[in-house]
Each structure stands twice: as C-alpha cells, then as structure tokens.
C-alpha cells in the first residue's frame, strides 16, 4: 500500500471520528438542555474527545496484545489440550 493511500485513509478515519464525536457532543448538550457551542469550539472539543478515545483504546489494545503473547508463550494458545 502506498504511503499516500495510507495517509489519505488515516485522514479519512480521523475526520470520521471527529464528526462522530461532534455529533455526540451536540446530542449531549441538547439532552442536558445546554446551549450548543459555536462550530469552532465544538470542532475543537470533538478533536480532543476523539484523541483521548484513541489513546485509551491504544493502551487497552496494547495490554490485550501483551496478554495474548504471554498466554501463547505459556502454551495456552497452541491448542495443546489445556481444556
């Protein structure tokens, strides 16, 4: 896969995450009966929310992957009849 394609896909996913976070923030403000902030403030907040979500997911997935590797090293992932 070319680096341009990877970059474009990454940007597309990032923009989609930001728009989703923006929609969720709007919904939350409306549900709480608060005034929805101006577009720039909302965009900034949505980028922050999606960035935090990505960092949390990344840490969690790193832990899961590490656990899977450890289980495999101990023989639990080799179908060795640990049932």
Image (cartoon, rainbow, N blue to C red):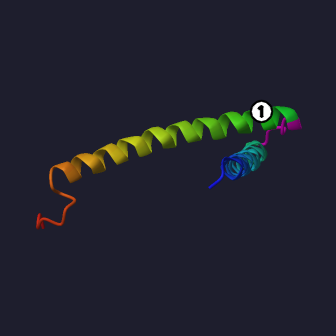
The residue identified by callout 1 is 44
Q: Nearer the viewer, residue 48 or 36?
A: 48
> Can you name the residue that lies furthest to the front here?
2
Instruction: Identify the magenta region.
Output: 33-39
Report if residue 47 lies within the magenta region.
Answer: no
| 54 sits to left or right of 7 | left
Q: Nearer the viewer, residue 5 or 21?
A: 5
- Dot 1: few (<14), some (14–19), or many (≥20) neighbours within 10 Å? few
Image x and y of residue 29, in percent: 76, 42
**Quadrant of the image occupied by residue 59:** top left
Going 68% across and 33% down the picture, which residue do you hit?
Answer: 48
- Above or below, 29 against 6 in this view is above
> Can you name the residue that lies furthest to the right here?
38
Image x and y of residue 21, in percent: 70, 46
Going 82% across and 32% down the picture, which residue do you hit?
Answer: 41
Going 18% across and 66% down the picture, which residue do you hit?
Answer: 79
Q: In which quarter of the image is the C terminus?
A: bottom left
| 68 sits to left or right of 82 | right
Number of numbered callouts drawn:
1
Q: Nearer the viewer, residue 57 or 14?
A: 14
Image x and y of residue 24, in percent: 71, 48
Q: Quadrant of the N terminus?
A: bottom right
**Quadrant of the image occupied by residue 45:** top right
Image x and y of residue 15, in percent: 74, 47
Q: Nearer the viewer, residue 80 or 49?
A: 80
Q: What element carries label 1?
A: helix
Task: Give the main secondary structure of the magenta stretch.
Answer: loop
């Amino acid at each position: 896969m070319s680096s341009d394609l990877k970059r474009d896909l990454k940007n597309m996913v990032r923009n989609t995450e930001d728009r989703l976070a923006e929609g969720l923030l709007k919904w939350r403000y409306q549900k709480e009966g608060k005034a929805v902030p101006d577009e720039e403030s909302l965009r900034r907040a949505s980028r922050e929310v999606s960035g935090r979500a990505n960092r949390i997911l990344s840490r969690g997935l790193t832990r899961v992957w590490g656990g899977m590797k450890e289980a495999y090293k101990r023989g639990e992932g080799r179908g060795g009849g640990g049932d």
